Amino acid sequence: MRHFPRITRKLCLPVLIVATLLTQGVMAKQPAPDLLLTTATGQHKLSDYQGQVVYLDFWASWCKPCQRSFPWMNAMQQKYAGRGFTVVAINVDTDRKLADQFLSLLPATFPVAFDPEGSAPALYKVPGMPSSYLIDHTGQLRLAHQGFHIQKQDQYEQEIVALLEEMESSQ
């Protein structure tokens, strides 16, 4: 077993804790950083969705779990859009053609933004592809997930429903 200097081990523990919390969906309530979203139909801001529950998803064309997440995100968009829910996906490919090829095979029924410079994932400190963030109707980050796990789809949906119910009870 290789031994690391004490300083490296001290730095690794907080990183491991944050990574573990992220994969478990635990997140301290905090304002979601606003983003300028460039989509095929123009530009708008993430804050334009305030008043809705938003599932913000960062993805790339080469990402195999992303291929599994798109049908699920389409289903969630269709099922809960009428209650004030939307999926917003941000592609991080440096070559837009790769994203377009992906979307020709797995079309999205929700807004897709393109960020080839990677400024949005940097702002959100995205640890890997895909990473998703649930934002409540007041614009607060509430939950985060790294990866997309088929066996956790029911959990992801329950988290969406809980935020929708919270929004509905506050109105």
Image: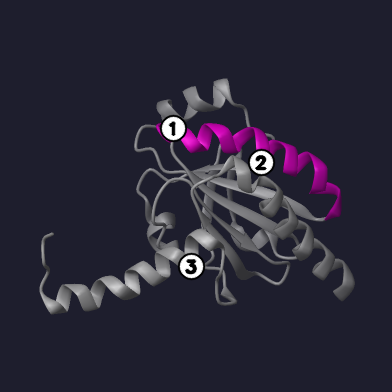
Asked if residue 160 lies left or right of residue 120, the reply is right
The mark found on residue 21 in the picture is 3
Q: Residue 16, how many percent across, how many down?
A: 35, 67
Q: Residue 26, how many percent across, how many down?
A: 56, 69
148 to 138, vertically: above or below? above
Disc 1 designates what residue? 61
Asked if residue 36 lies left or right of residue 170, the reply is left
Q: Earlier in the sequence, mark 2 or mark 1?
A: 1
C-beta proximity under 8 Å, tags 2 and 1: no
Q: Amino acid at mark 2?
A: Met
88 to 137, vertically: above or below? above
Between the residue at mark 1 and the residue at mark 3, the CA separation in whole angstroms equals: 26 Å
Q: Earlier in the sequence, mark 1 or mark 3?
A: 3
Question: Range of the magenta residues?
Answer: 62-83
Along the line of sight, the residue nearer the viewer: 73 or 110 = 73
Disc 2 designates what residue? 73
Q: Residue 31, how many percent across, how many down?
A: 57, 74
169 to 109, vertically: above or below? below
> What residue sits 43% from the left and 46% below the top?
129
Determine whether the residue tagged by mark 1 lies in a helix, strand or loop.
loop
Farthest residue, direction front:
1
Q: Earlier in the sequence, mark 2 or mark 3?
A: 3
